[in-house]
Image (cartoon, rainbow, N blue to C red):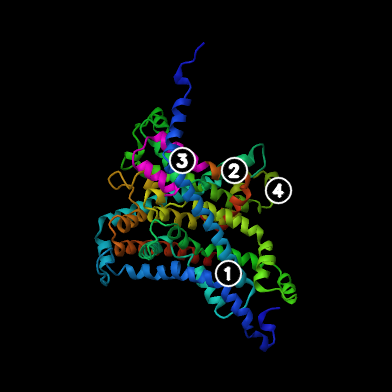
Amino acid sequence: MILPDSLIPWNLSMEAYDRVIGARSLLRWTLNTVIYSVVSVVGVLFFSSLAGYAFAKKRFPGKEVMFWSFIAMLMVPYHITVVPVFILISNAGGVNSYWGLILPTLANAQAVFLMRQFIKSLPDELFEAATVDGCSEWRMYVSIVVPLIKPILATLGVFVFLWHWNDFLWPLIIGQSNDMRTLTTGLASMNAENVPLNVVLAGSVVAFVPIFMAYLIGQRYFKEGVTMSGIKG
Amino acid sequence: MSVDTLPKARQRYRWREARIALLFVLPCLLLFIAFRFGPAVAGGVLSFTDYTIGADTNWIGLENLRRLNEDPLFWRALRTTLTIALLAVPLSILMSLGMALLVRRAFRGSKLFRSIFFLPVITSLVLAGIVFTWIFSEGGPWTSVMGWLGFADRAWLSDTTLVIPAIVIVAVWGRFGFGMLILLARLQDVPRELEEAALADGAGAWQRFRYIILPELKPALFFLAVIETTFSFQIFDTVYVMTGGGPANSSYVLVYQLYDQAFRYFDFGYASAIGLALFVMTFIVAMIQRLTLGRER
């Protein structure tokens, strides 16, 4: 018995995938999304753990004022700062550049707060012993602080990654050329340009799969990260 | 040892420690000054100017606010945003509550359900928007089902009234998993013996919920109400992808207007005024939370 062609949709759907991947854009957008997400995660974790450590375990002038003004920034909606930040970046020539995309997102109040809380809960003795041993501050950070904060690094890392992977408004504003789009803004542009729906849906699958795989492996971190921060990724 | 019990001399900063600590804080501080503090102030200041690209900037005082007041599109966007919040917040909380109660006891597959319900939270709203555009399209699944149920089978996204519930559905779909997890965490604190005792005394499901579970969940429900309201004020991605504010501006929300004014018309001053309005709205919600929580204590 010969099955009619229409029962086997492979031709059609494979063609859709092919056109997407063949469009080259999708690869470029994926690369951009990976750069945006990975560099931001590394940057946010590094800077916020340094600051969080200082806020939690060091005494220095202006500490309280600085810390609480960081936290106050959680109250200011993203949308009130997005216009001035855009003006700043665009005057500095950062439109359609990776640094323009990434740099402003490194100022993450939530990350500093969560880092500080976590490090504060660690016993002082762990740090004091090292000081007595004459450990330099930098070595102390690398060989004592970092290993101790691994759990929060993982949770926060997953959350920041997710947030950047799914981010839309900022890449939409900064990545204006086709080559500087991320997956979200790229797919939205395809959607707006009336690219056939099956092609757009195929692209969506490509964008969704990495996050889905990561979710399957590290569900715990996703749930912790999102609930801890209270923010949609 | 707390700071107060230390001898006076040691309370002074050890400068080596302070210097290194400041060095550790410095990168974050610079980033915050450039991209958070500065812009937050600038956003306020800009709303009193006519800043745009390639023209002189003038201080125009309250002109932008006067314009907002007289802009029918702003009032419409405000009304649409509030309508969406009014529908999406209770719905998503109810859905979170229902699902949390459903999966809280371990049963075959309860873990799987939790994972599936949480999946929309980590899904990009742009992707969700694309898929839902198809679901709501003419001949799409939603439209067909509505047709079979005897409703008019028109595409919701091209209907000036039905577009709002469509956007609310996507918003609730994307958010309820978050509330569910928050509530599940609280449900674990409900004393089991209490529930079992109530059951033994013949309390029905509703009574157990009303008198044992609900009081335990109250703070969490309140937290959710605030956070979900803030979220629905900021809806943008789905509107951008699904409707572009249409049809006939019927899904034109505040953040969309802000985006339009700033990045389509380059009217940065006016866009900042809309940002200010959003800030005031968020602030009012936070204040209501403060006051109500204060009274509860």
Label 1 near label 4: C-beta < 8 Å?
no
**Kind of residue at badge 3:** Ser
Tag on residue A51? 1
Q: Badge 4: few (under 14), some or many (20 or more) residues near its Cα, within 10 Å?
A: few
Q: Main secondary structure of the magenta part?
A: helix
The dot on residue B197 is 4
Disc 2 target residue = B115
Q: Which amino acid, mark 4?
A: Ala
Label disc, if present, on residue B207 of the rendered structure: none
* The magenta stretch spans residue A203: yes
In the picture provided, is B64 more to the left or to the right than A154?
left
Residue B59 percent coordinates (x, y): 27, 72
The residue range painted magenta reads A181-208
B5 is within the stretch colored magenta? no
Compared with B96, B137 (above or below) is: above
Distance Cα–Cα, label 4 vs label 2: 31 Å
Mark 4 vs mark 2: give the one in front: 2
